[in-house]
Image: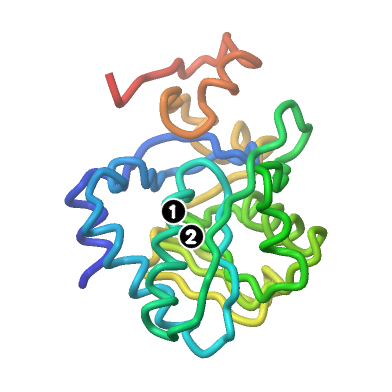
Amino acid sequence: MDVRKELERVGSIYTGHFVGVSTKHLAGYCNIDPLLPHTTLVGEMIKMLVENFKDAGVQTVAAPAVGAIPFAHWGAMHLKNMTGQEVSGVWADKVSGAAQREFVFEREGFAEHVKGKKVLILEDMVNQMASIKAMIKTVRDAGGEVVGVGCIAANRGADAKELDVPKFIKLCSVEYDVWAAEDCPVNGLCSRNEPIVEDIGHGDAYKKDHPDYKGGYVKLLS
């Protein structure tokens, strides 16, 4: 399967001026949401991912909320079928109001399936790595051993060494230029007054803090 081509077909890859959860400005965006209704396609992609970890002794597949939640169950099911061993599927919820991205296993019984277990983390898109690093920390803080991270797509720079995990697998690359919030007005898209997309990523939050941005705001989904 050509995963990138499938993402393009379902409308998951965008070009434009976006703001990520890291507050960095991006010249593109990969939004997995349009992929999720295609359950057979999602299942096939997750199977491709977890095949790379079938010999890692995975006991639990964990995912960060919200978009990657289905990956936990798809991943656990495929690994069970491959190995014949029971594999749990759990997710961590976002901590509301946190200054930086944080996750917690707050659902009843979820933490029990992480503590002392070999955990595979699955994510949809790894962009500036703020979310996936927070998820890795959450698993380790809960007593889990992270055996690897897998994702559908990733921007440049994401690898096992940067994430401090034994193994990192991505099904495709979706790369675009990135600027720190303070650099974008100097040499990025803000310096050219490129409109910011407000209904994908975190452009809406940026708009609340910068309502007078000269480039203005646009919506792609409505």
Which circle's residue, 2 or 1, is located before the other in the chain? 2
Q: Position of residue 66 (x, y in %)?
A: 51, 41
- Residue 195 seen in render: no
Q: Position of residue 73 (x, y in %)?
A: 44, 58
- Residue 63 seen in render: yes
Question: Which quadrant of the view contains residue 217?
Answer: top left
Q: Are marks 2 and 1 in contact (CB under 8 Å)?
A: yes
User: Which residue in the protein does label 1 denote?
Assistant: 176
For the C terminus, which image quadrant? top left
Residue ID at (65%, 38%):
94
User: Which residue in the protein does label 2 denote?
Assistant: 155
111 up-or-down from 203: above or below: below
- Crowding at label 1, few (<14), some or many (≥20) Cα neighbours within 10 Å? some
113 up-or-down from 221: above or below: below
Q: Position of residue 84 (x, y in %)?
A: 43, 84
**Which of the labelled discs sits on residue 222, or is there none?**
none
State the residue lying farthest toward the top: 212
Label 2 sits on a secondary structure element that is: loop
Seen from the viewer's position, the closer of residues 91 and 200 is: 91
Q: Is residue 138 left or right of residue 43?
A: right
Q: Position of residue 122 (x, y in %)?
A: 51, 62
Task: Give the amino acid type for the residue marked by disc 2 in the picture.
Answer: Asn
Task: Give the amino acid type for the residue marked by disc 1 in the picture.
Answer: Tyr
Residue ID at (58%, 65%):
121
Q: What colour scheme does the image use?
A: rainbow
Q: Is residue 84 left or right of residue 57?
A: left
State the residue lying farthest toward the bottom: 55
State the residue lying farthest toward the left: 9
Residue ID at (58%, 85%):
57
Seen from the viewer's position, the closer of residues 177 and 142 is: 142
